[in-house]
Amino acid sequence: MSESNITGIVLRRWDAGESDRKLSLLTEEHGRMEVIAKGARKGNSRLSGVTEPLSVCSFAIAAGKHRSFITQAQPLTSFPGLRTDYTRLTMAMSFVELLHAFAQIDQVNAELFQHAWIALKALELHVKPLVALLWSELIFMSIEGILPSFDHCVLDGHRLVENPAWISAMAGGHIDSAHSNEFSDRQLVDAEILIGLAKLSKLDRPPLAFKAALASFGVLSAFWYHHAHKNLPAREALAHHLTELQ
């Protein structure tokens, strides 16, 4: 087996075999990877704590013919502020669920790795974590090339002037009323929300406040579900939790 050192964020884990864990990692060096942590489910395992989701570690990886294995791990951070606040933790788990769903296996994307680290730190520390989550998701969409057009019609390029305005995840963003009947998933949204999302997507850091954050979360959800083509249970749990907080 060949060995290499990588820096990775644990996105997800599964039980494997009698005592192992399979991990989904977002790494700086190789993009997303799936690796095996031998014996990590044993109570005395040195790999037990570092295989928890949201852990960031320097991993020593041994690459076999069909699978890769963690041989050593040095913790870098686990974002402790996320683990002591249920709302922040739920948001962080929703965000890494998106990373797992959309980041490609073995496709190097150093920009995405750096953004993921910055986003998790923002979710840990920002005074309004939902604002940090919205910003983090929009930048992720931009990196992935799926950022919706919020303030211009995706079909004819006309600037948003209607209020309320139509959006469609199938279309890729805002659509003029003249085109609305072409898309079965169309929905009406307050124009101020769409303009706000367009502005937020251009910022290099999350602002201190953002109007209609909960409604904006719902707008983004429509696009995430459209692109994922599958359930996003952590996002569903977060949506339920945010509704309960109102």
Image: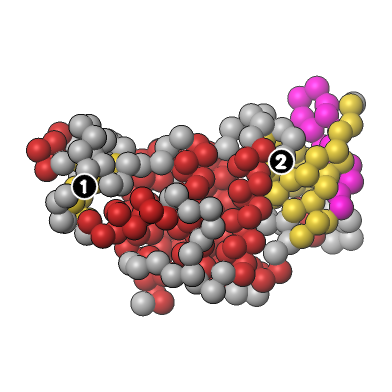
Q: In percent of the image, x 41 and y 77: which residue is there?
A: 245
Q: Amino acid at mark 2?
A: Thr
> Closer to the camera, 104 or 161?
161
> What segment carries the magenta color?
61-74
Q: Is residue 113 left or right of residue 182?
A: right
Residue 218 appears anywhere in the view: no
Q: Residue at x 83, y 56 (%)?
A: 75
Q: Amino acid type of disc 1? A: Leu
Q: Residue at x 22, y 32 (%)?
A: 155
Query: Secondary structure under badge 1?
Result: loop
**Quarter of image, res 119:** bottom right
* Gap between marks 2 and 1 measured at Cα: 39 Å
- The residue to which callout 1 is attached is 160
Label 2 or label 1, whichever comes before in sequence order? 2
Q: Is 54 or 162 nearer to us in this picture?
A: 162
**For the residue carrying disc 2, how many other residues have a C-alpha within 10 Å: few (<14), some (14-19), or many (20+)?**
many
Q: Secondary structure at mark 2?
A: strand
Q: Is residue 57 visible?
A: yes
Measured along the vertical axis of the image, is residue 80 above or below residue 231? below
Q: Is residue 83 magenta?
A: no
Do labels 2 and 1 touch, CB within 8 Å?
Answer: no
Q: Is residue 212 above or below residue 150?
A: below
User: Which residue appears at 52% of the width and 68% of the height?
Assistant: 129
Vertical position of residue 123 compared to residue 200: above or below: below
Residue 180 is marked as none
Per the rendering, the mark at residue 27 is 2
Q: Is residue 242 above or below residue 200?
A: below
Q: Main secondary structure of the magenta part?
A: strand
Q: Quadrant of residue 170?
A: top left
**Figure quadrant of residue 25:** top right
